[in-house]
Image (cartoon, grey):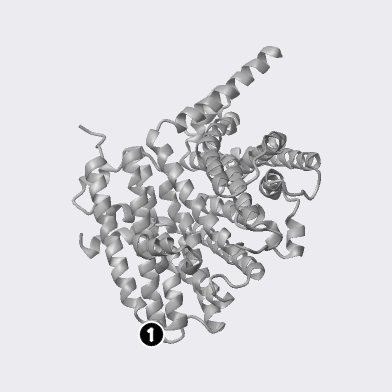
């Protein structure tokens, strides 16, 4: 699939969204409010609890901001991976399999979500607030690294949603398991050291949610440079394994609606 | 009169059955739904058991907090009719006209049809999680409390269904359904105590939110089920929620009628 086709898909998607301009603005505003209320609730929690996993209030705000940034990018570009179950249930997944293009890419390009941009605005504002409190990215290099972390986190969310949505091939319907991706972001907002050690290993390797908030915060607060290659390698491996597994499940378990 | 009532009751029962059977069509979905619920709940318990381990925060110790979230999870499964998603899609696609053609006022019976999936979620997803939690934490389980809370739950279900109709009728004016849905989720996050008990909020803010209908449906119901003292006697809370439900029904009816005026159906 060449870049021109991807670009055309993206442009078409945006044109569709802009057909109803005020709806687009309204959705962004509401999503921003939702993210802001999430932050408010976290702040209430911090006021009562104090330190969480030895993370101070500014550090917790930074974890929230980075996890929200990763989630927002996933929400903007990869959210349609959650629709796989619905496509299977409706019998429309054949459409993607018949075309001479990568089916996963087609599914992702089939629908973008307009309201994810609201999350993105709040995430950037939150990270800026954390920076003003003395933690977070300061230099242009830091900002570049933050963008790198954010995209890695978005790819992790994408891989999780792809894997969980693949259960739709067995269930032949959209399952709660696929929608779990939306809930997992709440857990990416907490430092990993509050979990038992076995779960820490799981969340760093098998389901690397640590990339979506905890590791980037450790990098910006402790300047641990080994986190950068670890993030890159873990993300690539996780995406590769997820896509391969998705392909295997699809090939073995999907039965076409046709003859 | 008796015949009409019998017919109505029979229709209600059939709609509940229909919702139940539609949910069970996909066998394996039950397993995956349960797995998803267990993972979400287990992570939530892990976080809160860490935060409240060996200490009390805002009046909650570890078992109380786990009990709170167990029941909150259970109540959330029951009190999510989901009529708004169905209705909004029908309105936006124009398929609402098909529902209006049906003789048995399908739209009036929709909350009953959605009661079937709510029962499915309670029995298949909620109760196993509660029983499993009981093995690890002393979560109070009282049949007496479960029965006496039913009127409040029913009033809350009516209120939430009416709220769904009210929100869905906004789709007569805008196509931003997911924006409206997100607005609902946002309001719920703040007012129900689903993510955080109201005791964690600043005192002035918690006082304002204390008797709102969403707090009555979720927060106070959970407090009662966990055996914690309530802010007011249960009959008073039921009465208050019934008043809210009636007001919501009236508003939903008015909004729906206003929206229907904008509906134009092509054809003969």
Q: Residue A214: x percent and y percent?
A: 45, 71
Residue topped by disc 1? A141
Instruction: Give the quadrant of residue A211.
Output: bottom left
Task: State how many labels appear.
Answer: 1
Name the residue nearer the viewer: A88 or B127: B127
A192 over A178 or under it: above or below: below
Q: What residue is at 70 percent from the left and 42 percent from the top?
A: B248
Q: Position of residue B234 (x, y in %)?
A: 78, 41
Tell me which residue sits at (47%, 34%) in the image. Answer: B266
Task: Quadrant for residue A44, please give it.
Answer: bottom right
Q: Is residue B91 left or right of residue A256?
A: right
Q: Nearer the viewer, residue A19 or A56?
A: A56
Q: Does residue A215 show up? A: yes
The chain carrying label 1 is A
The secondary element bearing badge 1 is classed as helix
Q: Position of residue A171 (x, y in %)?
A: 35, 39
| Image vertical order of residue A252 relative to residue A33, above or below | above
From the viewer's perspective, tell me whether residue B116 is left or right of residue A149: right
Residue sitting farthest toward the top: B3
A42 sits left or right of A158 in the view? right
Along the horizontal axis of the image, is A46 left or right of A115? right
Q: Position of residue B4 (x, y in %)?
A: 66, 16
Does residue A1 sit above or below A90 in this rendering?
Answer: below
Let me know if residue B267 appears in the view. no
- A117 versus B78 height, above or below: below
Which residue is most to the bottom?
A139
Residue at position x 47%, y 81% in the image: A221
């Amino acid at each position: 699939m060449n870049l021109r086709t991807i670009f055309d898909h993206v442009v078409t998607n945006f044109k569709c969204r802009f057909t109803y301009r005020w709806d687009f603005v309204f959705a962004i505003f509401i999503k921003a409010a939702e993210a802001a209320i999430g932050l408010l609730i976290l702040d209430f929690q911090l006021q009562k609890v104090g330190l969480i996993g030895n993370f101070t209030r500014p550090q917790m705000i930074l974890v929230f901001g980075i996890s929200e940034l990763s989630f927002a990018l996933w929400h903007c570009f990869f959210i349609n991976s959650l629709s796989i179950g619905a496509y299977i249930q409706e019998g429309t997944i054949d459409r993607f399999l018949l075309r001479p293009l990568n089916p996963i890419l087609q599914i992702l390009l089939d629908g973008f979500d307009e309201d994810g941009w609201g999350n993105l605005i709040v995430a950037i504002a939150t990270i800026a607030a954390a920076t003003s409190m003395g933690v977070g990215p300061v230099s242009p290099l830091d900002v570049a690294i933050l963008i790198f972390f954010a995209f890695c986190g978005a790819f992790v969310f994408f891989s999780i949603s792809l894997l969980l949505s693949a259960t739709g091939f067995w269930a032949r319907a959209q399952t709660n398991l696929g929608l779990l991706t939306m809930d997992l972001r709440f857990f990416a907002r907490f430092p990993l050291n509050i979990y038992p050690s076995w779960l820490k290993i799981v969340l760093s390797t098998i389901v690397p949610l640590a990339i979506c908030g905890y590791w980037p915060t450790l990098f910006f607060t402790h300047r641990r440079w080994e986190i950068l290659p670890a993030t890159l390698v873990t993300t690539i491996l996780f995406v590769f394994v997820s896509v391969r597994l998705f392909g295997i499940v699809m090939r073995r378990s999907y039965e076409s609606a046709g003859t | 009169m008796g015949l009409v009532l019998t017919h109505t009751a029979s229709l209600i029962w059939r709609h509940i059955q229909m919702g139940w059977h539609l949910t069970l069509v996909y066998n394996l979905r039950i397993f995956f739904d349960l797995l998803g619920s267990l993972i979400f709940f287990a992570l939530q318990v892990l976080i809160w058991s860490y935060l409240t381990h060996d200490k009390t925060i805002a009046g909650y110790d570890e078992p109380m907090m786990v009990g709170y979230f167990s029941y909150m999870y259970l109540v959330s499964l029951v009190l999510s009719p989901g009529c708004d998603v169905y209705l909004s899609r029908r309105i936006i696609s124009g398929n609402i006209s098909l529902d209006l053609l049906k003789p048995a006022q399908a739209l009036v019976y929709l909350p009953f049809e959605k009661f079937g999936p709510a029962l499915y979620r309670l029995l298949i997803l909620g109760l196993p999680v509660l029983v499993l939690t009981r093995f690890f934490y002393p979560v109070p389980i009282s049949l007496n409390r479960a029965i006496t809370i039913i009127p409040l739950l029913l009033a809350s279900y009516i209120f939430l269904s009416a709220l769904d109709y009210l929100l869905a009728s906004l789709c007569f004016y805008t196509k931003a359904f997911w924006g409206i849905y997100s607005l609902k989720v946002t309001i719920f996050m703040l007012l129900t105590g689903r993510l955080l008990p109201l005791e964690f909020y600043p005192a002035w803010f918690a006082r304002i939110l204390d008797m709102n209908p969403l707090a009555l449906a979720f927060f106070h119901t959970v407090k009662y089920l966990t055996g914690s003292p309530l802010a007011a006697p249960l009959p008073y809370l039921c009465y208050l929620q019934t008043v809210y439900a009636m007001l919501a029904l009236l508003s939903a009816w008015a909004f729906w009628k206003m929206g229907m005026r904008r509906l134009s159906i092509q054809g003969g």
